[in-house]
Image (tube, rainbow, N blue to C red):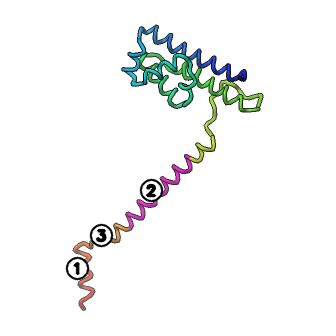
Amino acid sequence: MSHTTKNCEDHRFELGTLMKDLRLEKEKTLEFLRDRTKIPLQTLIFMEEGNASFFKERLYSRGFISVICKELKVDPAPFLDKLDCCESKEDSSKNLNPNHEACSPPLKTSSSCIKKTLLFSFLILLCLTGALVYKSFLEEKTPPNEETILKENTQITP
């Protein structure tokens, strides 16, 4: 186990302990949080234990922490910063740049993110093109009004 991995486990455990301390300070039970936030009980337990499975999906862990803090009426920013700090340390262990700051938020420029953005843009463009084609098709199929019929009839009969 690398030093960085151990350090991240410490951060997760510390974050879980802080969340548990906050809950106890507000005199709330895990069952109360489960009922109010709709977060499964096992997930809340994993969070308070600092279990890595809770922190596996960043989006969910950030969302859960935000919802819990909102329910306990505290600012989620310090907790989210601690979560981001740990994740950026994991990222920096993969980065060979020694000048990389360990607690800066990771950049979201992964190739999968770029691919998803391009795909989404393409789908939007495709939908807009389809809408324009459909509109022009409808204009061609619109039945003529009375003025158009009268003009055509007067032009046909000399």
In the picture, residue 96 is in which quadrant?
top right
Q: CA distance from mark 1 to mark 3?
A: 16 Å
Q: Mark 2 against mark 1, which lies toward the viewer? A: 2
| Amino acid type assigned to the residue bearing label 2 in the image | Cys
Asked if residue 89 lies left or right of residue 82, the reply is right
Circle 3 packing at 10 Å, graded few (<14), some (14-19), many (20+), is: few
Q: At x 55% / y 13%, what residue is drawn?
A: 17
What is the distance, in whole Å, between disc 2 and disc 1 at their CAs? 38 Å
Amino acid found under the numbered disc labelled 3: Thr
Q: Is residue 135 magenta?
A: yes
Q: Secondary structure at mark 2?
A: helix
Measured in 3D between alpha carbons, the distance from the residue under mark 2 to the one under mark 3, in whole angstroms, is: 22 Å
Residue under pointer 2: 127
Q: Position of residue 77 (x, y in %)?
A: 53, 21
The chief SS type of the magenta part is helix
Say which element carries label 1. helix
- Image point 54% across, 13% down: which residue? 18
Reading the chain from its start, which is encountered first: label 1 or label 3? 3
> Of circles 2 and 3, which is in front?
2
Q: Specify start and end residues of the magenta stretch as a single range.
A: 116-136
Which one is earlier in the sequence, the residue at label 2 or at label 1?
2
* Residue that carries the numbered disc 1 in the rendered image: 150
Determine whether 57 is above or below 123 in the image.
above
Q: Are marks 2 and 3 in contact (CB under 8 Å)?
A: no
Earlier-in-chain disc, 2 versus 3: 2
Expressed as whole percent of the image width and height from the top left, the position of residue 10 reads 63, 17
**Residue 11 lies in what quarter of the image?**
top right
Name the quadrant of the N terminus: top right
Disc 3: which residue = 142
Question: For the residue labelled by badge 3, is the local secondary structure a helix, a strand or a loop?
Answer: loop
